Amino acid sequence: MNYIDTNVILSYLNKRDVNYHKAFKLWSIKEQKVISEVTLLEIRSVLARTTKLNEQEIEAYIEYLPETGVKIAEGDLYEIFRRAPEVAFKLKMKMLDTLHIAACLEINAGSFTTLDHGFIEKSKVISEFGITIVWE
């Protein structure tokens, strides 16, 4: 499974985004695309902060995601948070980034697709968890 980072989703779904073409290329990877509840929360937060979309429009955006071919994985949020401290100590990244990697572990995603250079810079350490960083 290929866990898709929030930035790839938002760039892929907005043809005017500066990273649209990179995200489009990444989206063409044939492996099953998955996201978690962490991703859904981050999408809601980003759209609420950076757009004029109202709550109903943001929820419609969320409901549309499965139509793009991405699956919302059934991960246990308790287990994601239980794994997060180990990830945090090793990666030393922001909280949501830590939770994304913990979610990958919880749902057994072997790869993490991102446009975020923070993940790319930490790819060696992340690989110690059995997760490959996919970018550009």
Image: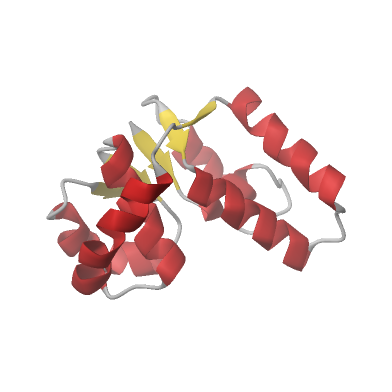
Name the image quarter holding residue 69: top right
Seen as rendered, the residue at the extreme left is: 128
Seen as rendered, the residue at the extreme front is: 78
User: Is residue 99 placed above or below 20 in the rendered structure?
Assistant: below
Residue visible at 31% across and 53% down?
102
Left/right placement of residue 60 relative to residue 136 reads: right
Name the image quarter holding residue 76: top left
In terms of depth relative to the viewer, which is nearer, 27 or 69? 69
Left/right placement of residue 21 relative to residue 128 reads: right
In terms of depth relative to the viewer, which is nearer, 24 or 113? 113
User: Is residue 34 placed above or below 19 in the rendered structure?
Assistant: above
Left/right placement of residue 57 relative to residue 40 reads: right
In terms of depth relative to the viewer, which is nearer, 24 or 116? 116
Residue 113: image location, x then y, percent: 39, 46
For the N terminus, which image quadrant?
A: top left
Q: How many marks?
A: 0
Residue visible at 22% across and 47% down?
131
The image's colour scheme reads secondary structure
User: Is residue 29 placed above or below 12 in the rendered structure?
Assistant: above
Residue visible at 28% across and 75% down?
92
Residue visible at 73% across and 52% down?
16
> Taking the image as drawn, is residue 113 in sight?
yes
Residue 96: image location, x then y, percent: 45, 64
Residue 87: image location, x then y, percent: 24, 63
Residue 64: image location, x then y, percent: 70, 31
> Taking the image as drawn, is residue 101 in sight?
no
Name the image quarter holding residue 50: bottom right
